[in-house]
Image (cartoon, rainbow, N blue to C red):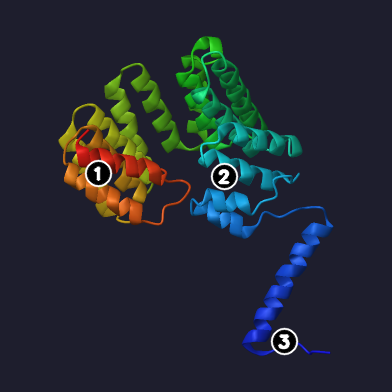
Amino acid sequence: MVRIETTGPMGKQFQQFASAAAIWAMFVASGVAAVSPQAEELYKRTDYQGSAALLDKHSSDPEVLNLLGRDFFMMGEFHKAADYFAKALAADPRSSEQAMWLGRAYGRCAETASPFAAPGYASKARQSFELAVKLNPRNKEALSDLFDYYLEAPGFLGGGFDKAVGVADQIAAIEPAEGYFARASLAQKKKDYSNAESDLRRAVESAPRQVGKVIELAKFLANQGRTSESDAVFSRAEREFPNSPRLWFAHAKILVKQKRNLDEATQLLQKYLQAPITADDPPRHEAEQLLRQAATGA
């Protein structure tokens, strides 16, 4: 019989492994299948195929099904993603998160469907977002998704400006900065650009460490033709957030769209493609497409 040494560095490693194995065995014995940490890490690193390959496609665990759905969503396979999110919600019907992701998948299905099928998917997206907010009225992401739907969808699909205003008030009550941002979107929809700018600046002031708010202000100024002001906001942000790939991408996208400072846009995109981006950042293929546009000036 071989005796396993449990003292010293190797012994400590064995004890840690045994402890992790015991925890995993406890999950299995209790009928709860934990998501593979490696699969979740691969998702965060944007290796969606690698993440999905590690997961049981026939699992009944809602967290496994959710991660599979997110993997396929990020790979652009929206119908397959919707199937997994629907199963995840059926397995965990009180989860606001599952309903929210199902709405996102249906929304992308609507965007890519035929004119005959799109309205059905859009309605399912709205119903899922409404359910997500009903299950958790403080789910800020679900509220934001529902706000966007109400703001952009026509009335016959359940959209409406008045509905969007109501959700904006809910958002503001939870997080003022997000509320200002929602109200800026409402103002832009009405072409009230003065109030839109004021609310965007209030959003930045309320959340000075949220780079996304700064990006939206810079984009707004650029879209208004105020390019020098937009560039100044981006330059200041790049000093305050020197390691933000999301910021580099946004700045480069504006420059490519407006066909100016393309050398700077190229440098930003090259830096972006070399950075360790996450699932919250724009996908690499979009940066590669912008890089080609910058090279041709198209």
What amino acid is found at the position of numbered circle 1 in the picture?
Phe
Q: Which residue is mark 2?
A: 71
What amino acid is found at the position of numbered circle 2 in the picture?
Asp
Q: Is residue 81 visible?
A: yes
Pick whichever, 4 or 22, lies toward us: 4
What amino acid is found at the position of numbered circle 3 in the picture?
Thr
Marks 2 and 3 sit apart, C-alpha to C-alpha, by 39 Å
37 relative to 238, above or below: below
Kindly state the secondary structure of the residue where label 3 is placed: loop
Q: Position of residue 176 (x, y in %)?
A: 44, 36
Q: Which residue is mark 3?
A: 6
Q: Position of residue 107 (x, y in %)?
A: 54, 27
For the point 75% across and 87% down, the residue is 4
- Quadrant of residue 157 in the image? top right
Q: Position of residue 53 (x, y in %)?
A: 62, 52
Question: Tag 3 or tag 2, which sits nearer the N-term?
Answer: 3
Quarter that holds the C terminus? top left
* Foreground disc of the pair 1, 3: 3
Q: Residues within 10 Å of mark 1 (few under 14, many from 20)?
A: many
Q: Position of residue 165 (x, y in %)?
A: 47, 20
Marks 2 and 1 sit apart, C-alpha to C-alpha, by 32 Å
Q: Which mark is residue 226?
A: none
For the point 67% across and 54% down, the residue is 35
Q: Are marks 1 and 3 in contact (CB under 8 Å)?
A: no
Judged from this view, the residue extending furthest toward the top is: 156
- Quadrant of residue 271 in the image? bottom left
Quarter that holds the N terminus? bottom right
Q: Which residue is mark 1?
A: 234
